Image (cartoon, rainbow, N blue to C red):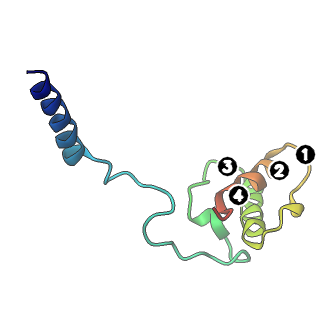
């Protein structure tokens, strides 16, 4: 009887995974890569994600950080802890090769 209960539990888990699986979850880094805009293009990397609620200086710094990550240049990071430094760090982290 115990073996039958374990079998039914495993069958339930497998059926649930098959029905509800995680096939519809978006995973970063899978699927086709979006066309990467050039760092000098207006909007740059920030066009690929929604930064509409952030100030313009944050968005510009995000693009600069992304461009620096693609070049492999962490030394161009701005000093301070304002929105420019945070935008640069976020852009660098987003575009950094993994």
Name the residue beneath numbered marker 4.
91
The residue shown at (76%, 61%) is 65
Do the residues bearing badges 2 and 1 touch, measured as CB atoms within 8 Å? yes
Do the residues bearing badges 3 and 1 touch, measured as CB atoms within 8 Å? no
Q: Nearer the viewer, residue 17 or 45?
A: 17
The residue shown at (66%, 63%) is 95
Gap in angstroms between the C-alphas marked 1 and 4? 16 Å
* Secondary structure category for the residue under label 2: helix
Q: Is residue 15 left or right of residue 31?
A: left
Name the residue beneath numbered marker 3.
54
* Secondary structure category for the residue under label 3: loop
Q: Is residue 93 above or below residue 45?
A: above
Name the residue beneath numbered marker 1.
80
Q: Quadrant of the C terminus?
A: bottom right
Q: Identify the mark at residue 85; answer none if there is no mark.
A: 2
Gap in angstroms between the C-alphas marked 2 and 1? 6 Å
The residue positioned farthest toward the right in the image shown: 79
Which is nearer the N-term, disc 4 or disc 3?
A: 3
Q: Quadrant of the N terminus?
A: top left
Which is nearer the N-term, disc 1 or disc 4?
A: 1
Gap in angstroms between the C-alphas marked 4 and 3? 13 Å
Question: Label 4: few (<14), some or many (≥20) within 10 Å?
Answer: many
**Residue 20 appears at what percent x and percent y?**
24, 44
Q: Is residue 2 visible in the rendered structure shown here?
A: yes
Which is nearer the N-term, disc 2 or disc 1?
A: 1
Which is nearer the N-term, disc 2 or disc 3?
A: 3
Q: Is residue 43 visible in the rendered structure shown here?
A: no
Q: Is residue 72 left or right of residue 43?
A: right
Closer to the eye: label 3 or 1: 1
* Secondary structure category for the residue under label 1: loop
**Residue 9 appears at what percent x and percent y?**
18, 30
**Residue 28 appears at what percent x and percent y?**
50, 58
């Amino acid at each position: 009887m115990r073996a039958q209960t374990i079998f039914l539990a495993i069958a339930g888990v497998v059926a649930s995974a098959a029905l509800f699986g995680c096939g519809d979850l978006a995973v970063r880094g899978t699927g086709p890569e979006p066309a990467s805009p050039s760092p000098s293009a207006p909007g740059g990397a920030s066009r690929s994600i929604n930064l509409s609620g952030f100030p313009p200086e944050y968005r510009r710094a995000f693009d600069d950080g992304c461009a620096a990550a693609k070049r492999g240049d962490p030394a161009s990071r701005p000093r301070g802890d304002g929105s420019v430094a945070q935008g640069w760090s976020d852009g660098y982290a987003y575009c950094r090769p993994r």
